[in-house]
Amino acid sequence: MRTHVSKYITNPKLFKQQLLTWSQSFREVAYLDSNDHNDRYSQYDCVLAVDAFTSLKTDYFNAFEDIKQYQQTTQDWLFGYLSYDLKNDVEVLYSANHDGLEFPDLYFFQPKKLFFLKGNDLEIQYLAMCEDEFEDDFSSIQSATGNLQPTTDNEQPICINQRIAKDEYLKKVDTLLQNIHHGDIYEVNFCMEFYAENTVINPLEKFLKLNQISEPPLAVFFKNKEHFLLSASPERYLRKTGNQIISQPIKGTSKRFAQADEDENSKTNLQQDPKERAENIMITDLVRNDLSRTAQKGSVEVTELCGIYSFRQVHQMISTITSTLCSDYTAIDVLRTTFPMGSMTGAPKISAMKIIENIEESKRGLYSGAVGYFSPKGDFDFNVVIRSILYNQEKKYVSFSVGSAITSLSAPEKEYEECMLKAKAMFEVLQ
């Protein structure tokens, strides 16, 4: 059982920073921030969950059944992630590439302490054993005036390595184009890793900087002891509210420009680009097919096709697909039948995932997986882990990955340029 308390917050922006600063003393932290985007599908402006009462950590084997049982047993708020490699639980696949991060394939925790901020209204939910700590914690949060803004680090310069050199990347794209021309696939998301070894960073500092320069609608700071995710994701994987399911795949990217006319031209060119539209429409069709597996007959709809949305770093092409969940299926069934998300795999999905494993050189792990939460009623909201920095504090290993969709219209040089555009914010944060 949870005890509920409501508070009025006069300065929500400051309070969000104070919440995040206060949370750093806990071993388990999930901080989700919408950055004040007018997102019709987001229920809260900010959520913080800390201090695990129970948790679930497992590899990919039987992972979806494990999280289903955990959810049914707790019937409470659960925060955590699904790594890309849960694909091996869904299909007969494997993951054998280099893994410098060594995160668990799946991790969720049931928090003792929860904070939900919407506008000026704060709702606090504590498990009963912690209810006497309400007021002391609230006072501590309000006095948390530590590193609320990113500052100039006094750290040593970080040497960032590229797992796939440019020349090799171009050759690999040529190989993928051959796969497409042979009819093996018609779209594939190809990713590459950037990494730094023997490196110490301040995760909070880096997240604040990444969030400040990106201001995405689905930002996440996630901590599980020595494992950190600093995510500036603009993409929603799936949201469930009652029996309504929403997916918002991103496919299509263009630069932002300081000059208004150049910036507007970039948006227009993205909207009209046949290659970018083809990418988006192919993945929209894939998502429609995935959602139909658990949907009431005739309920899958594309409510927006190839919409253009502007973020601090880039313009993106986003489609929105909705469905009504059939009563024969559970929340976990929706995740199992759509995971991994089509925007990070390709089409046909299984063939694309097999090719990805053979041509990429790093295990994706949490990158291109999903982070989010389940509510006690079985609703959920998950982002796509892109535009994110991952850090294993114990191993002193820092990693971020970027990718792009390869289709028959792809030019290898342009795909490389798109990857570097997506990597810009992470480079700026780490160097």
Image (tube, rainbow, N blue to C red):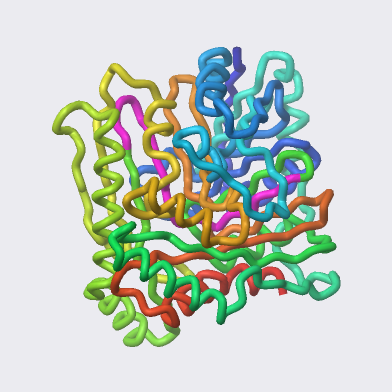
Q: Which quadrant of the figure has residue 77?
A: top right
Q: Which quadrant of the figure has residue 239?
A: top left
Determine if the magenta segment contains residue 229. Answer: yes
At horizontal 83% and vertical 61% (from top left) the residue drawn is: 200
- Tell me where the magenta segment starts and ends, as one range: 227-245
Q: Which is more toward the observer, 429 or 47?
A: 429
Image position of 72 with respect to 214: above or below = above
At horizontal 25% and vertical 41% (from top left) the residue drawn is: 289
Residue 383 image offset from top left, x and y in percent: 48, 46
The answer to whether residue 75 is seen in the rendering is: yes
Residue 39 image offset from top left, x and y in percent: 37, 50
Q: Which is more toward the observer, 264 or 249?
A: 249
Q: In the picture, which quadrant includes the N terminus? A: top right
What secondary structure is the stretch in magenta mostly built from? strand
At horizontal 73% and vertical 60% (from top left) the residue drawn is: 398
Q: In the picture, which quadrant includes the C terminus? A: bottom right
Q: Which is more toward the observer, 67 or 260?
A: 67
Image position of 123 with respect to 344: above or below = above
Please state if 200 lies on the left or on the right of 286 as rendered.
Answer: right
The answer to whether residue 118 is seen in the rendering is: no
